[in-house]
Amino acid sequence: MDLILQTLQAIGYITLLLVLTLLWYKTFHQSKQMWGWLAVAWTMNLLGNIAWVFHDLVTGTMLDTFSAVDLFFVLRYVLIGFALWLHPISLSRRDGVWIGAAVFVANAMVWTIYFNPAMKLRGGDWVGFLGLAMYPVLDAGIIMLVWRRIRSVSEAVWRRQSILLFFSMASYGIANTINLTEYVFSLTSNGILQNVFWILTDVFVLVMAPNTSSGQKIQS
């Protein structure tokens, strides 16, 4: 199991670097703000992972479930949110209501279903629990956001990109939900399934980004 997990983690870092290379290439060669938002978002993801590994190597202890490193991962959501909300045109207030509703429902479900079992099995307090619980909630908001983006566009290129981004964000949300579920309901976790979905998150972006050629006029 350890070998499989290490292999998946290595694949994950490789796909992350490929996504970063592609997104920054698109940013500088097409000058589209959307690619810039996404490139910085995935850069935050990389920096978060580097900070996490650096902490563990230097201190010799595992990172707390809620720490300053989470700032990098939260910024990733914010930047992706900007990209999806603003491009190709800004979404409406009604879309914001749908997103807010998704976040509210997900938050209520997470704290109702997971909090008490987490306290019984793992102990700790709500702050530590927040470090895992907030990600499926943020995922729900982003997934609803990209779904509203799909409904708002008619151009084939934007619809194709939005659908692939939907699958990417859904994969990330599934991975984080599996991660939370294993943490709450099991003292052991091999981490394999969530790593598969984290990899799929980047794979869908690798498929999405080349679909827009430099010759196509996309407003930003």
Image (cartoon, rainbow, N blue to C red):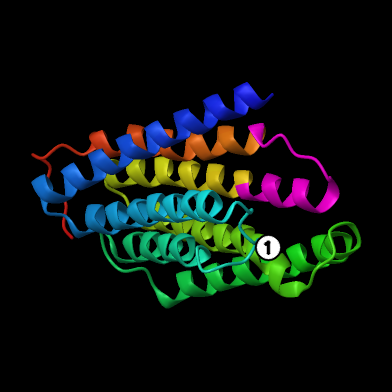
Tell me the residue that label 1 is attached to: 133
Q: Magenta region: which residues? A: 176-192
Q: Please state, as top left, top right, bottom left or bottom right, where the C terminus lies in the image.
A: bottom left
Front-lying residue, 101 or 80: 80
Front-lying residue, 8 or 150: 8
**Residue found at x 46% / y 50%:** 49
Coordinates of residue 113 in the picture (x, y in percent): 83, 61
- Magenta segment includes 185: yes
Q: Within 10 Å of the Cα at label 1, are there few (<14), some (14-19), or many (20+) other Cα atoms?
A: many
Q: What SS does tag 1 mark?
A: helix
Coordinates of residue 89 in the picture (x, y in percent): 27, 64
Amino acid type for the residue under numbered disc 1:
Ala
Picture quadrant where residue 112 is located: bottom right
Front-lying residue, 82 or 28: 28
- Magenta segment includes 214: no
**Residue found at x 42% / y 38%:** 202
Q: Is residue 93 above or below residue 129?
A: below
Q: Taking 180 as reference, is 48 left or right?
A: left
Q: Taking 202 as reference, is 65 left or right?
A: right
